[in-house]
Image (cartoon, rainbow, N blue to C red):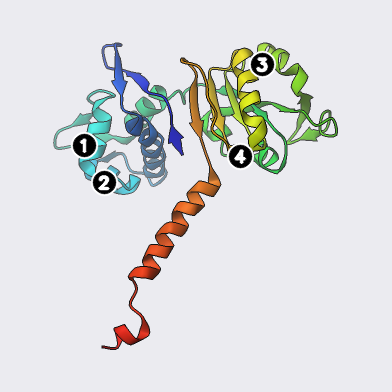
Amino acid sequence: MTILRNTQLADEHGAQRATPDATVARLPVYLRALTTLIDLGVATCSSNELAEQAGVNPAKLRKDLSYLGSYGTRGVGYDVEYLRYQIAREIGQTQDWDVVIVGVGNLGSALSAYQGFSTRGIRVAALVDSDPSRVGTVVSGITVTSLDDLDAVIADRGVSIGIIATPGEAAQPVADRLVAAGITSILNFAPAVVQVPEGVDLRKVDLSIELQILAYHEQRKGAASPTVGEASR
């Protein structure tokens, strides 16, 4: 997953501090780790314990959390519940966010049915497609709307986040329409590079690229392994 825009978080005095993209990307990981600790009944934890749960370097975790403010106590560590709330607040997880999914093929349908969105404050408010055979059908309890009505759908529901789940060739035109309709954050699943104007946040998820990266590492592992003859020497 790729972050394509810088983000700012408020410091403890309410001022905006530029936060590295890599740090912002790790905050949801910390949030998930803290939630796991809460489920386990853990009330406080050290940076080392939280880092282990999140799968990151402790020094990196401490640096990341420094952008949020000072929430740890020397010799005690972090109050798990309080830190979870602070991270959730900083990344907008203390309120619900409506999203529109454009493209209701296999991927779009699967995304609309994903239950994990609701537990993270994300609500699929509308499904939009250009295929007349899909318009009017009901997917995951939502009636699919025509792409021609995209502007009205976004305005009526007050949506600010759009998800592109179309074929690659349709991604840029759809992104343009989303931006023109007032969308200011886009998650692109289409296998295509999309350009957006300044002020619009764009993230890309390309599953094929991620699998190709894994295939590369698998190939490297195979190349590094000794042959049967070499192993017996």
Which of discs 4 and 1 lies nearer the camera? The answer is 4
Q: Distance between the residues labelled 4 and 1?
A: 33 Å
Q: What residue type is labelled 3?
A: Ile
Q: Distance between the residues labelled 3 and 2?
A: 43 Å
The residue at which mark 1 appears reads as 77
Q: x%, y% of residue 212?
A: 49, 53
Q: Is residue 186 above or below residue 49?
A: above
Q: Which amino acid does label 2 sit on?
A: Glu
Q: Is residue 13 above or below residue 46?
A: above
When asked about the image quadrant of residue 151, the answer is top right
Q: x%, y% of residue 60?
A: 24, 38
- For marks 4 and 1, the one nearer the N-term is 1
- Few, some or many residues within 10 Å of mark 1 (<14, 14–19, 20+): some
- Few, some or many residues within 10 Å of mark 2 (<14, 14–19, 20+): some
- Few, some or many residues within 10 Å of mark 4 (<14, 14–19, 20+): few
- For marks 2 and 4, the one nearer the N-term is 2
